[in-house]
Amino acid sequence: MLDFVQQLVSGVALGCVYGLIALGFVLVYKATEVVNFAQGDLMMLGGFFAFTFIGMMGLNYWIGFAGAVAAMALFGMLAERVVVRPILGYPQFSIIMATIGLGYFLRSIAGMIWGTDDLKIETPFSQGVLRMGTLVLAYDKLSVIAATMILCTLLWLFFNKTTLGTAMRASSENMLAAYYMGIPVKRVVSIVWAISAAVATCAGVLLAPITFIHSNVGLVLGLKAFPAAVLGGFGSIPGAVVGGVLIGVIESMAGFYLAEGWKDVAPYIVLLAVLLLKPEGLFGLHVRKKV
Amino acid sequence: MRFLFKTDYEDDIKLFPHSGYVVSYGILLALLLIAPYVLSSYLMSQLVFVCIYATVGVALLILTGFTGQASLGHAAFLAIGAYTAAYLQKYNVPFPVYFLAAGALSGLIGAMVGFPALRLQGIYLVIATISFALIVEEILARWESVTNGNEGMRVKTLSLLGVTVPRDSPTFYFLCLAVLVLTIVGTLNLLRSPTGRAFVAIRDSETAARSMGVNVALYKVKSFAISAAITGFAGVLFAHKLSFISPEMFTLQLSIEFIIVILIGGTFSLHGAVLGAIFIVMIDPFLTYLKDDMPGIIAGIAATFGAGSATAGNIQSKVAAFASLNGLKGAIYGIIIMLFVLFEPLGIYGRWLKIKLFFQLFPLYKRATFKRQKIYVKSERNR
C-alpha cells in the first residue's frame, strides 16, 4: 500500500511536468489551431537559460527563474515572428513541419552551446523531504505539483475571464472572422507563443532537479506530453493537466507493477486507445460535424 | 519548347506525354546502368541508399502527397520489412519469398494502422502514427526471442537463385534500382487508375470524394497498405545493405528523414521523392567534405588574398572546429526544413518547374503563377 502511494505521488509529480508541457501545446492549439512540435525543445532551452543565469552567473534562484521566463517569452515571440507568422493560414502540415524543423535546430544549437553533459540547477527545493508517517515526499516533486496547479488556474482564468483570452479563443475558432471583428490576430498569436514559451520554461526549471537538463530532454518529454494533451482533449487547459497526471501515474504504475518495457509504451497504448474510443479526449468539446 | 495539344482523354493519362520524356528518361536510365563501372565504390554505396530512400519516399508520397494522410511512422514499416527478412533468413527461406513476405506483412500491418486512422485527421493522425512507430520500436527492443533485442540481428548476404550478391556488388545496386524503377512505374500506373484518382480526390476534399461515390474508408486503408508494403520491400534492401539491424536504427528521426525526403523534393510529383532522397543521402558526404577539405580550401583562398600564414592557419582551424561541431547535422536539417517550408513549399522539383516555366514564357513570366493561397480554415473542432 505504501509502495502504491509512493508510486502515485511520484507519478503525479512526473505527470505534472507532462501536464506543463502539454499546457504549452494546448495554449498554442487553443489560440491558433496549430500544434507546436518544438514545445519540448522550448522547455529544454528554458532550462538551459535558467542554468546560465543561476548556475553560471550565480544569480539568486528566483531572479534567475524570472529572468529565464522573461528571456524565453521574448524568444517565443521571436520564433513565432520568424517561423510561424509567414505560414499562418496555410495547411497545418506546413506548420507542423516548420516546428519540427525549429525543434531540430534548437536541439542542436543547445548541444553546441551548452555541451552534451547533464546539467543540474541547485534549487531551494532540491534538499529536504516531507515526512507524513512512513510516507516520504521530496520537496522538489511537491514544488512541481504546486506550480502546475497555480499555473493551470492562472491560465484558465486568463482564457475564460479576460478579453485577451476571449480574443485568443475567437481567433482559433475562425481566424478570418476574428480579423473582421477587429481582433489583431497576429499580435494575439505572438502573445500566445510568448506565454507558451514562458510556461515551458517553468516546466524546464522545475524539472531540472528531477531529470537534469540536457539537449535531448525536450524531445523525450515532448513526445510524452502528446498523450497527455490528447487524453485531456487538445484545447482544454484543465484537460492537459489532468491528462498529464494520468499519463504520469500510468507510466509510474506500469514501471512498478508490469514487466520491463511496459513503462515506455504504456502512455502510447493509452493514447491510441483514447484516439480510437474517444478522439475528442476526456475534456474535449464534442461538436457535431456539419457537412 | 514544345506545346502539348491534348485531343483525347487518353492524352491526360499517358505515361509518356511526348517523345522527349522517352529520350530523357532513357538517357538517365542508361547513365544509371553504367554508373557502377564508372563511379567509385563509395559513391555507389551512396547511390544504393538513394535508391532505398527514394523507394520509401515514393511510398510516403502515395500516402501523404496523394492521399493527404500524414504519417510520421514510416520507419516502423521499414523496420518490419527489415526484421521480417532477417528473421526468415535464419530459416533459409529463399530471397524472393521473404522479400514478398516482408512486403505483405508490412502491408497488412499498414492496413491495420489504416483502420484506426480512418477516424483521425490532421494532427491527431500525425500523433497516432508517431505513437505507433514508438510502440514498434519498443517491441523490437523487447521481443528478444524474435528480434534479438537491443543486440540487433545480423543479416546474411543476399543470395538470389543460388548466386550470392554481396552488398557492395553492382548486382545489388541493380536490384535496388530495379525495385525503385518498378515502384515508380507501378505508382505512376496506380495514380492514373481509378484508385489513384480516388486517392487524389480524398486529398483534395473528403466530402466531395464521398459525394462522388468514392468509398473513402476503403481507399484510405488501401493507401496505407500500399504505402506500407512498398516501405517493407525497401526495408529488406535496407537490411541487406546495412547487413546488421538493431532497434535504434528505426527511430522517429528516421521517420522524420523520410518526411524531409518528400518535403524537400516536392510533395506533388514522383520526381520529388527521388530528388529529396538524393538530397538526404548527400548530407553526410557533404558534412565529411566540410570537415576534411573545406578548412584547407578556405585557408588557401585567404592566403591568396594576402592573409599571412598565421591568419590562414587560424581561419583553417576555426572552420575545422565549426565543421566538426557536435550536432551540426541536426542544425542543418532544422534550418533546411524551415527554409523549405517558408520559402519553397513545392520543394526542389517545384523550383525546377518554376525555372522551366520562366524560360518557356520568357518575357511574360508572372511570379504569381505559383503563389500559395491562404486558406484560413475554420477550427477543426467545428468542422
Image (cartoon, grey):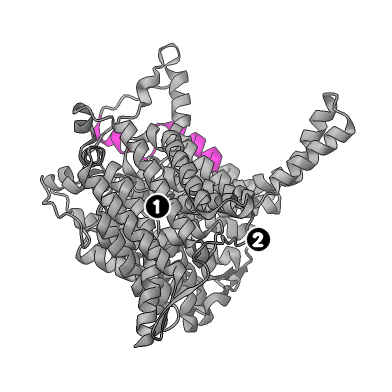
In this view, B261 is above or below B102: above
Q: Earlier in the sequence, mark 1 or mark 2?
A: 1
Quadrant where the N terminus of chain A lies? bottom left
Residue B229 visible? The answer is no
Residue in the foreground of this view, choosing between A38 and B320? A38
Main secondary-structure element of the magenta-colored stretch: helix
Same-subunit check for callouts 1 and 2: yes
Total numbered badges shown on the rendered structure: 2
Q: Name the spot of residue B243 as percent of width and height, x first.
A: 60, 68
In this view, B70 is above or below A206: above
Q: Which label sits on residue A66?
A: none
Instruction: Magenta stretch: give its range.
Output: B8-29
Q: Name the spot of residue B179 as percent of width and height, x first.
A: 48, 56
Q: Label 1 crowding class (10 Å Cα cut-off): few <14, some 14-19, many 20+?
A: many
Q: Name the spot of residue B242 as percent of width and height, x first.
A: 59, 64
Residue labelled with disc 1: B60
Residue name at image x 37 percent, y 57 percent: A20
Instruction: Give the CA separation, mark 1 to mark 2.
Output: 27 Å
Residue in the foreground of this view, choosing between A275 and B188? A275
Q: Amino acid at mark 1?
A: Leu
Quick check: is B26 in the magenta stretch? yes
Residue in the foreground of this view, choosing between B338 and A153? A153
Q: Residue furthest bottom?
A: A1
Residue name at image x 37 percent, y 46 percent: B188
In screen coordinates, is B109 left or right of A220? left
Question: Which chain is home to disc 2?
Answer: B
